[in-house]
């Protein structure tokens, strides 16, 4: 049996110190590994919902692409294309509006392209139009504008009745309208005044 005197010998002390250092090093290594494992486990817990979301997106990729295509086609029918020059689009809008009002039976006395504005990825193209004619013709013109593609919006309208000589005559009005349409992105999309 080993007594206290034996443990005090230098060779036993060196062996004991070495074993103590090894035990401390192993404990330290186990603690470090345990902390790293907890850290990686927490990262995996953070990644799992992101991975599940990504897996869901991958599974529904074809559906998302179809919806994107449908949205793009719908947008293309509602606004002018980005590839067209904004000046040409403004002229086209002016001609379309004049044609709608004239076809409905209104006499267009003036139209003017106003300042274009960049807004939320679109160019807002504005025109002012003056016309006169019957109230029924004005109603018909607005019905046609509602069906127009790309869409034409009414920003402001002032309708003033004209005097009639006889109450049996249809009501005639003078119309001043500010109309607008949108262009996706647009070339030369900076603010313009004509």
Image: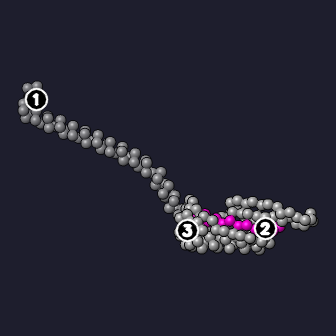
Please provide the residue range marked out in magenta. 123-139
As displayed, is residue 100 above or below residue 18?
below
Q: Which residue is mark 1?
A: 7
Q: Secondary structure at mark 2?
A: strand
Is residue 78 something one can see in this rendering?
A: no
Q: Which residue is mark 3?
A: 186
Q: Earlier in the sequence, mark 1 or mark 2?
A: 1
Q: Nearer the viewer, mark 1 or mark 2?
A: 2
Query: Residue drawn at (39%, 48%), measured in percent from left and top?
Result: 43
Q: Secondary structure at mark 3?
A: loop
Q: Secondary structure at mark 1?
A: helix
Q: Earlier in the sequence, mark 1 or mark 3?
A: 1
| x then y, percent, for residue 19 | 16, 37
CA gap, disc 2 and disc 3? 33 Å
Residue in the foreground of this view, choosing between 186 and 22: 186
Toward the top, the furthest residue is 4
**Are the residues at dot 1 and dot 2 in contact (C-beta closer than 8 Å)?**
no
Could you classify mark 3 by the number of other residues whose Cα lies within 10 Å: few (under 14), some (14-19), or many (20 or more)? many
CA gap, disc 1 and disc 2? 118 Å
Query: Residue drawn at (11%, 25%), measured in percent from left and top?
Result: 4
């Amino acid at each position: 049996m080993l007594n206290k005197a034996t443990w005090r010998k230098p060779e036993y002390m060196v062996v004991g110190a070495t074993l103590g250092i090894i035990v401390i090093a192993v404990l330290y290594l186990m603690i470090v590994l345990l902390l790293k494992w907890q850290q990686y486990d927490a990262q995996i817990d953070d990644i799992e919902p992101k991975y599940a979301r990504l897996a869901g997106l991958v599974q529904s990729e074809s559906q998302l692409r179809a919806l994107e295509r449908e949205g793009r086609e719908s947008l293309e029918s509602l606004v002018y294309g980005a590839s067209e020059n904004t000046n040409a689009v403004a002229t086209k809008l002016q001609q379309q509006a004049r044609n709608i009002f004239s076809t409905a039976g209104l006499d267009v006395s003036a139209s003017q392209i106003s300042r274009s504005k960049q807004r939320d990825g679109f160019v807002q193209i504005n025109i002012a139009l003056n016309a006169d004619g019957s109230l029924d013709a004005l109603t018909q013109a607005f019905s046609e504008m509602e069906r127009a593609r790309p869409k034409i919006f009414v920003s402001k309208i002032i309708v003033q009745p004209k005097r009639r000589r006889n109450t049996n005559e249809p009501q005639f009005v003078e119309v001043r309208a500010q109309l607008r349409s949108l262009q996706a992105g647009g070339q030369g999309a900076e603010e313009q005044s004509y």
